[in-house]
Image: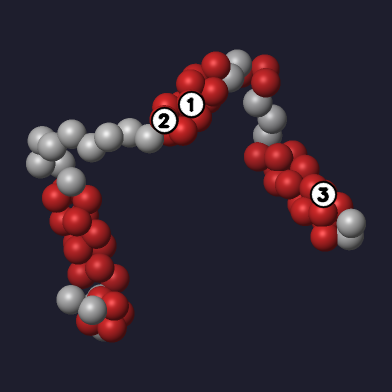
Amino acid sequence: MSQNDIAKMSVEERVALMEALWASFDDGEAYPVPQWHEEILKQRAAYKEEDLIPFSEAKKEIHEALNAYRNS
């Protein structure tokens, strides 16, 4: 199946194809988890509620950092 074939499918057909693809990974085989995945999960598990900021604030900080980077 080519990318062109997929593009011709309806949204419903593409979603069904995606679901079938994801389900194909659930065949009982073990897939190795990269070390960096485990480290990110440990970092996220260590977050405390008071360390989190609202999405709007995070978005603002990201935009400010990108603008500073672009202007440097």
Dot 1 amino acid type: Glu
Cβ–Cβ under 8 Å for marks 2 and 3: no
Vertical position of residue 71 compared to residue 38: above or below: below
Left or right side of 69 for 21: left
Q: Nearer the viewer, mark 2 or mark 1?
A: 2
* Residue 12 visible in rendering: no
Q: Which of marks 3 and 1 is in front?
A: 1
- Residue at the farthest right position: 72
For label 2, the SS is helix
Quick one: quadrant of the N terminus?
A: bottom left
Q: From the image, tell me which residue sits under label 2.
A: 35
- Which residue occupies 10% across, 41% down? 27
> Residue 3 placed where, x, y %?
29, 78
Q: From the image, tell me which residue sits under label 1.
A: 39
Earlier residue among tags 2 and 3: 2
User: Residue 19 got which mark?
Assistant: none
What kind of colouring is applied to the model shown? secondary structure
Q: State how far apart marks 3 and 1 are (Cα).
A: 27 Å
- Which residue occupies 19% across, 61% down? 16
> Which image quarter: residue 72?
bottom right
- Which residue occupies 60% across, 16% down? 48
Report crowding for label 1: few under 14, some 14 to 19, many 20 or more residues within 10 A (C-alpha): few
Dot 3 amino acid type: Glu
For label 1, the SS is helix
For label 3, the SS is helix
Dot 2 amino acid type: Gln
Vertical position of residue 38 compared to residue 71: above or below: above
Q: Nearer the viewer, mark 2 or mark 3?
A: 2
Q: From the image, tell me which residue sits under label 3.
A: 64
> Residue 9 placed where, x, y %?
24, 78
Earlier residue among tags 3 and 1: 1
Cβ–Cβ under 8 Å for marks 2 and 1: yes
